[in-house]
Structure formats: C-alpha cells, structure tokens
Amino acid sequence: MQAPGTASPLSAAQVGRLREEQGKVVTSCQEKIQHWRKVENDYEALQERLNTLPDKLSYDIMVPFGPLAFMPGKLVHTNEVTVLLGDNWFSKCSAKQAIGLVEHRKKHVRKALDDLQKVMKNFESRIEFTEDLQKMSDAAGDIVDIREEAENDGTETKGKRRTAHKPHSKPKVLDVFEVHFQENGMDTKSKGCSQSEEELWARLEELERREEMLGEFDRTPDTIEANGEDTTSSEEEKEDKTDLNVVHRVEDSTTQDNVQKEVTNSELFSGHVNGPSHYHSDDEDDLGVDHFVPTIFFSHTVEPKRVRINTGKNTTLKFSEKKEEAKRKRKNSNGNGHLVPELPNIKTPADIYRVFVDVVNGEYVPRKSILKSRSRENSVCSDTSESSAAEFDDRRGVLRSISYDEATYSDNSEGILEEEEEEGQEHLPKKLSTLSGTFEAFSGTVIEKEPLSPLIPHPSIAHPVLPTIPERKSEEVLSEASEETTKRISKFKAARMQQTN
Amino acid sequence: MSGREPRREDEGAKLHQKEELNRKIKEQKVVVDELSNLKKNRKVYKQQPNSNIFFLVDRTETLSECKNTLDDLKKAHQEIENSEKTKIRK
C-alpha cells in the first residue's frame, strides 16, 4: 500500500505502527463520543425539567449554600430562565424559549456525535485493511509486490533549467532555442556543443539588440521633446537602473507606461554600455548614448534649480531663472507641456500647500518662504479665494475705508514675511484681505492677465498698479504665476510711494 | 486476526457496560431500601442532574420510580447475561 522509501515497504513494524495510530484515533473518537453523549444526556434532563418547571407556581427546593451546605427555599419564578449564550452573556427568557434553545443545542450535539461515529467507523475499516495488509506481508507466499522505479531525470533537468534560466531570461521568441542550450549547459554532457551554442546565442542576442536600437532611433527625438519633466524623472530612474542587468531592462521596457517606454528603452542602451562588455554591439550602443544623453541631462539639471529658486528670497534671480527655464522648455518644444500640467493642478489653497511644501521624514514641512513663493508661483485667483473665504466678508467694509493705510502697512509686513514664515502667516490674511478689498472683482482678471486698474475701486491704489501691468505682461509669457506677486508688490510699493509723495 | 480484534473490543465494551449496569443496580437497590425505610413525614429531595439544586419530591412517587428503574436495570442486565450465555453455547 504505502512505500515509506525503505527497501521493504511493508515492513511489519511500520504496518504495526500504522495500525497503532489508527487504533489511537478510534479510541479518542470513542472518548469524545462518550463525552458528547453525556452532554446530550444533561441537555435532555434539563429539557425535561424545563418542560415541567412552569407547571407549578413555586417549588420547594434546597438551595445550595456553598458547596457543602443547603438551605430550604422556594423557587418562585418558575417561568423565568436566564440562558448562558456564551462568553458570560446571559439572556432572560421563558421556559418554553429555553426548551427551544436546548433543542437547538441538542441538534448540534447530535451532529457532532454523528461526525464522530463516522470518523470512528472510517478508522475501524482502515484498521481492518491494515490488518489484512499485515497478514499479507506476514504470509507473503503467493503475493508479489510489483514496483516500477520512477525516473526523475526529466523533472530534475527541468527544474534546474528553470532556476538557472531566470537571470538570463530572454524574449519569448527564442524560448525553444534557449531550452536546448540550457539543457545542454546544465547537464554538462556536451560541453563543446554548449559552447558553440553559447556563441550562437550571444550572436542572436546582439542581433536582437541591434534590431531594438534601430527601432529606438526613429523614436528618440520625439521622446525627449514630448516628455519634458518626465524625462528628467525617468532619467533618475535610469541612473539607478544602469547597474542592473540588461535583461531587466528589456522587461521594464515592455511593462512600463507608454509615456516612459521610449525613455526606458534609452536606458536599455546605456545599460548595454555599462553592463556586459562582451557584447559586440558597443559602437551602436555608443551611438545611442550620444544620441540621448545630452538632451536628457539638459532637462534633468533644470528641474532642481527651479525648485531651489522658488524657495529663494531674491526675486530678481527668480525671474531671470524662470525666464531661462521657460526658454529652455520652449527649445525642447515643451512650452505647453510643462506649464499646462502645473497650473491646473492648483485650484484650491490646499493644492498650493501640497505643491509648495517639502516632505521631510514623511511629514509635510512648509518651506521657509512658502508664503512668498506661493504668492509668486500661483495666480492671485487662489490667493484671493483663500482670503475671501476666510476674512473677506468680515473685513470688506472696514477694509474699503482703511485699505489705503493698511496697504502700506501690509507692505511692511511683507518685509517681515520674507524672513519669518509663521509671523507671515498671521499677517498674510490681513494683507490678502486688504487685497481682496481692492481685488474684489480682480481675481478673474488676473487669470486672464488683463489690466486690473479699471476694476479696482480705490483710485489711490489703482493708479500705482497701472504702471506695473505692462511689465508683468512682458514677463507673463514665460511664467504667468509669478507675475501676480510682483504686480502686487509693485502695486503696494507704488501705493506707498504715492502716499509719501 | 482482523476478526479477533473487534471481538475483543466488543467484549471489553460489553464488560464495561455490564459493570456499569451492576453498579447502577446496586445503587438503585440502596435507594429503594432507603426510601422504603423512611418515616412518612420525611422530606425527600431529588437533585437536578448537572446542577446543585435539590427539588422537593413526593416520597412514595420517588419510591415507585426508583423501583421501576431498578426493574429496568435488572432486565437489561438479564438480557446481557442471556446474550453471553447464547454466545458461549454457540
């Protein structure tokens, strides 16, 4: 029946042990059955008692008084039973309901009993079978054991091939050939043959790479131009990935998104250069690298600069950098590609916060000059919305009257803003609210980059604003978000100037 | 061999059953004796199985109940004895 791997599969000791274990199971089943029978009997007695309990109004009973003593007493609530539902939860019910509960539990007990009976019968039959087996093995006169040795060679080579195959996994097209090669290599039966095949394999690999490269060359210019920021981000990935195997690259290129697909393919080329040097397609790889690296490097260096500039306090620097960046972007024919995705993202103050905070240790930490950068980066639309939501309604009337004076004050406060962020946050609403007083209808126009002056109610402020507008317009083409702040500042400054004058 | 083992088990189970029956019969005999020798004004309490509460019961009723159960037990015992005898004869 069973062959535990020993020479004599039906050794008496092992069969005896099997028989023993089966007997143990049967005895344990019997014990369990006994236990369940007792439980069932208890439930039956309880049911009987519950059946007759409500027959009388009161019963004379001996009330247990500790484990040893009793007291004569009376059972009065004969139709009130508290049933243990489990986990020390009780439910009060009538005797009849309790009988139903008992019946339900008895059903469960009966089911358990039936199951145990089945198990016991099953094992008893097994015991019989084992005993028959024992008899046969004891008196093995006319009984012959027929066995066939299983040949594991096929399965073993299969398993080996698979494990060894993983690091060198090739495109599926060549699977058949690959199998052949690997089998030979692993079996070490025909080493010479395997070597020749290895060469053949290398050749095929090379050819394939060439094919891929040729395919890439056509696409590469589009890739760089179209990707913009994506190329920069993916370039970082590429730098990381160059250490990896070429094979992984191939897999990556197939699995990644369409947008990044070309880029990853370019990674493939660089990987070829850095990775396996024994490939014969170096010249082609170099070509690929020359073709790709400059452009990618270009956009990559742009990115961190821009970020730093945003946090910086020097406005003029910021602007010049922004211009340059925008020009570069345009060179890459990416002018729309870059700006469009950034601006629509910022629709609420929360978005602004999200965009212009740094993540430090998994926590959002606002940048030092977040207020300033925010006001510069984003259109007044967001700022005014914030201010209007928070304080515009309250201060509106007052601000209209005061706004002139406060404008000057807020200008001063902005000077503080640049240095102290928290303090600035307190001041900002004030400033914004003052602005909102003046910008009431102005938020819409800012987005459109149209002149603000006609919409501003206060002539005193409106006048200084006017001269700034042309400047802003000239700069706006490059980065529209930053203009608003300059306009604002210039406006206040102008207002203050006017006041002083 | 396969036939012997179950028979042994059966025998063991029957022996166990018989012992249990004998014990119960003895118990019941004692109960009947005690109940029949009680004074008429004595109170008799019967324990609710699986609990510690004793219910007051009628003495004569209990006595008759106990006699009945004793008879049943004796009958069962007799049956077992008879079956054993028939087996031995076979």
Image (tube, coloured by chain):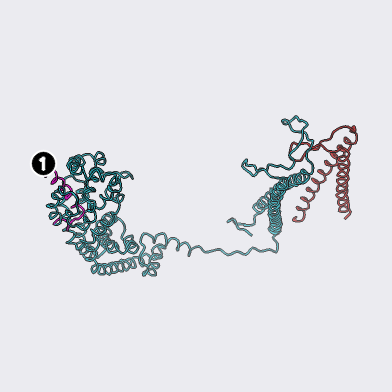
The magenta stretch is A474-501
| Mark 1, other Cα within 10 Å: few <14 / some 14–19 / many ≥20 | few
Q: Residue furthest left?
A: A501
Label 1, secondary structure: give it: helix
Residue placed under numbered mark 1 in the picture: A500
What is the quadrant of the C terminus of chain A in the image?
A: top left
Residue A279 appears left or right of A79 = left
Q: x, y (%) of residue A351?
A: 30, 51
Q: Which chain is red?
A: B
Residue A280 appears left or right of A99 = left
Residue A11 appears left or right of B60 = left
In this orientation, which residue lies closer to the viewer: A77 or A345? A77
What is the quadrant of the N terminus of chain A in the image?
A: bottom right
Q: Which chain is cyan?
A: A
Please name the amino acid that badge 1 sits on: Thr
* Residue A394 inside the magenta-drawn segment: no
**Position of A247 relative to B25 (above/below):** below
Q: x, y (%) of residue A10?
A: 64, 57
Number of dots carrying numbers: 1
Q: Quadrant of residue A203?
A: bottom left
Q: Residue at x 10, y 41 (%)?
A: A500
Q: x, y (%) of residue A455?
A: 19, 54
Which chain letter matches label 1? A
Q: Residue at x 31, y 58 (%)?
A: A245
* Residue A498 inside the magenta-drawn segment: yes
